[in-house]
Structure formats: structure tokens, C-alpha cells
Image: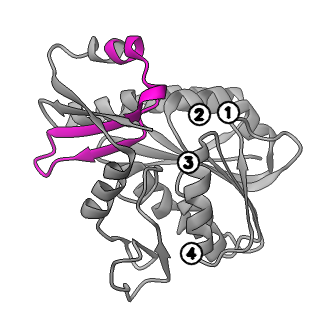
Amino acid sequence: MNYLQFEFETENQQQLEQLIALLNEQGFEGFEEDEDERNLKAFISEDKFNEEGFYSVLDLFSEIIYTRTIVEHVNWNQKWEEDFKPVIIGDFVSIRAGFHAPVTGVAHEIIITPKMSFGTGHHATTFLMVQQMALLNFIGKSVLDFGTGTGLLAIIAEKCGANKILAIDYDEWSITNARENIEQNKCVNIELALLSKIPADKTFDIVLANINLNIIISNLISISNVLNPGAYVLLSGFLKENEILILGALKEVELIYESTFQKGDWIVIVAKKL
């Protein structure tokens, strides 16, 4: 299947990050920022592209320049490999591809095959999620990774001691990619499932949800319902400007807000079930 590649010229970093968030909600699956933090490449499969939704995003900006090209599936994978660099998050975890040299001085070294699924640690939201995972106790816990992408967060949860992990995603390609990465990292406690909704017959001690604003808002009731008493939830995939909306939604489903952490314009919210 071919992919559409859009190249945008934005006015500043804030506009670029707003554009990423909005395109993510329209189903775009991959983003590549230029070094000057103004130019952006965004990718979406042809069968998922909604022209009306795309132009509704562009209408939110006074003026934005872009080009559109078709990229073959295999070429995008090669592009990932060319641009993929190791990510090191403190002394907690390193995330690298198999073709990189080993990284020392971290508690956990994760190998991720850089394909088209979201979640290599490069984007601010994934970075924030991993950073906050370092502060949670996963030992013996049950975990839901909602929108697993590459499987990165599920893999880290197992490395941190979780013994029962359900990783779900609606996209078949993500499930295939996550399975490869789970096997590569020798994980045995992760169950993968092709699902768009959270199963109501399971409960969890920790929920990890790094998706986008609309999906998180529409699934907060389901998230709250599957949390055990005292369970934690990490939410990301949205901008700082959406924080008030998320905090209001948390109150409606009786989840207790604990903290917000920010990287650029992106945030992660930590909440708890009483």
C-alpha cells in the first residue's frame, strides 16, 4: 500500500506542534521534523486519508504552504532506518534499533525496529510517557497499553517488572510491528490484541494511553472502569492547551488528577483511581 507524504512549511515550533496534534487526530501515522523545527513531513496511508478532514485542519491556520507526494511503502521504512537515532532517557532506558551499537549506563536497553508504527521515543509524548513510567512501581502489576504502536511502552512495562500486560491497537500493521519488537526484546508477559476498544472484562493496575485527544476523551469512561482501586493512568498525545479539557473529563469519570509534565508544547497527565 502506498502512503501520502505531506511536506509543510510552518511559521514556528508552536504552529508545527499544533499541526502534528491535529493531523494525528486525522489518522496521520508518522511525522518527521526538520532540524530548524519549522519544516514537517507527515505520512498517512492512502486508504485512511480524508480530504475533507485534512482541509478542515488547514483552515485553522491563516496561511500554510505544503506539497503532497506519493511514497511507496518500502521506501518509507528505509527512510525510518536512515533517520532513526538512539533515544536515551536519563539512566532509565535507551531505545535503539538493531543496527545501532549497544548503549551502556541505563537500566533498560530496548531494541525497536524502526517501521511505521508510532512510538520510538523520539516524539515528545512518547518521551514524556517513558519518563513518567520510571517513577511508577510496575513490579507484579497488570498493565494496559492502549494504542501500543511499536509496543515500546508494553515492553518497558515488562522490563520494569509487570507480569501481565495487554497491548491493544486498532491497526494491523502496528500489531505486526509490536509483535516483532516484543520477540526482539524477549518479552513473555505481553498479550497483543487487534482492538479499537478497551475490553470491559479485564482490570488493570496501570493504564498507559499515548494516542490523541479525541480518542482519550471518548475512552476515559472505559479507562476508569477497568482501573483497580489505587491504579495509575498516564495520558498523553495532546498539547498543553488541551490540559483544562482533560482535567474536566477526569473529574467526570472520578479519576483524581495528580500532575502534569511538559516537553515543548506537549504534555503527559498522571491520574489515579481511588
Check contact, mark 1 vs mark 2: CB within 8 A.
yes
- Please indicate whether residue 134 sits to the left or right of residue 222 in the image: left
Check contact, mark 4 vs mark 2: CB within 8 A.
no
Inspect the image, locate mark 4, and give the three-letter code of the amino acid beneath it.
Gln
The answer to whether residue 45 is above or below residue 161 is: above
Inspect the image, locate mark 2, and give the three-letter code of the amino acid beneath it.
Ile
Q: CA distance from mark 4 to mark 2?
A: 29 Å
Residue tagged 4: 184
Inspect the image, locate mark 1, and give the three-letter code of the amino acid beneath it.
Leu
Residue 135 falls in which quadrant of the image? Answer: bottom right
Residue tagged 1: 220
Inspect the image, locate mark 3, and give the three-letter code of the amino acid beneath it.
Trp
Mark 4 falls on what kind of element?
helix
Of residue 119 and residue 179, the one placed in the foreground of this image is: 179
Q: CA distance from mark 4 to mark 1?
A: 32 Å
Residue 273 visible to an observer of this rendering: yes
Q: Residues within 10 Å of mark 2 (few under 14, many from 20)?
A: many
Residue 136 visible to an observer of this rendering: no
Query: What is the span of residues highlighted in magenta in the rendered image?
Result: 26-55
